[in-house]
Amino acid sequence: MSTESSTHLVLIPSYNPGPKVYETVAAARAQWSPVWVIVDGSTDGSAERLAAMAAADPGLRVEVLPHNTGKGSAVLQGARLARAAGFTHALTMDSDGQHPADLIKSFMAASVADPRAMILGDPQFDASAPRIRVRGRRLSNWLVGLETLGAGIADSLFGFRIYPLSPLIQVMEHHLWMRRFDFDAEVAVRLCWRGVQPLNLRAPVRYFRPEEGGVSHFNYWRDNVLLTWMHMRLFCGFLLRLPILACRRPATRV
């Protein structure tokens, strides 16, 4: 049975997600209410079908953005709307079926118990995960550990996580970046810099092949360049904050 909340909602950014999005949304709704989908300028017809689902389900809301602006931008749009509606926290999950909807309730319970923390999914990969993606995120995770002086972010790129909305919005409104594939890693680092503690919970992740309905918008050249530039600016920010981070380190989680 779906759990209803007036403080925590599920937020799903979606861009040309393929047919898995309908299963993803249905699975999320089976666990939680409300669920909001932010359609980020999709051109595959999914916006219309999602809107029809929302018309028949009061626990589902669909917002359609006119142009594709990136995952981070879609999350920010949804976060602003959610805070204006009185919500305090949002669990973000991808629309392509990779994230475990059956863990929504346990993640939400952890957030309710520790509302000042960000609840981060620690992905457990199976054989479906592309090796190059797994190896690449190891480097990103090592860099994030350095940039936060070991604040405890287990995985920097896994998007199944819960954010306190006010610090999330404040961080994003003060910086022009983290609007696309750089969103997940950079926002986690900057929230750590602001004193938002990470709490890591294990979560399985599944990569679907194209014949299974899997869709990936990751571009190895473009997005790795984006991540490289992100880590360059984060490292500069780390150097400026090093004395503060060093003083705060004993209070961080491990």
Image: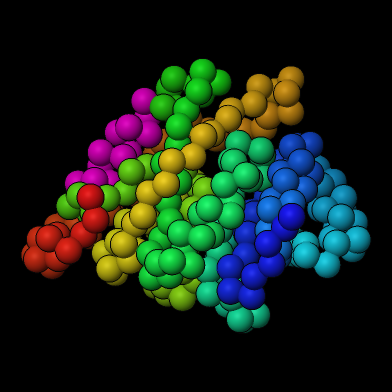
Say above or below: 102 vs 217. below
Colour scheme used in the picture? Answer: rainbow
Say above or below: 221 vs 60. above
Please indicate whether residue 160 sits to the left or right of residue 193 in the image: right
Q: Say which of 213 and 250 sits in front.
A: 250
Residue at 67%, 32% in the rendered image:
215
The image quadrant of residue 40 is bottom right
Q: How many marks?
A: 0
Magenta range is 135-146
Query: In the image, residue 188 lies at what x, y percent?
Result: 37, 56
Q: Specify whether residue 34 is painted magenta.
A: no
Please indicate whether residue 50 sits to the left or right of residue 20 in the image: right
Query: In the image, residue 226 lies at what x, y percent?
Result: 41, 44
Residue at 40%, 67% in the rendered image:
114
Chief secondary structure of the magenta portion: helix
Q: Is residue 196 visible?
A: yes
Say above or below: 253 vs 127. below
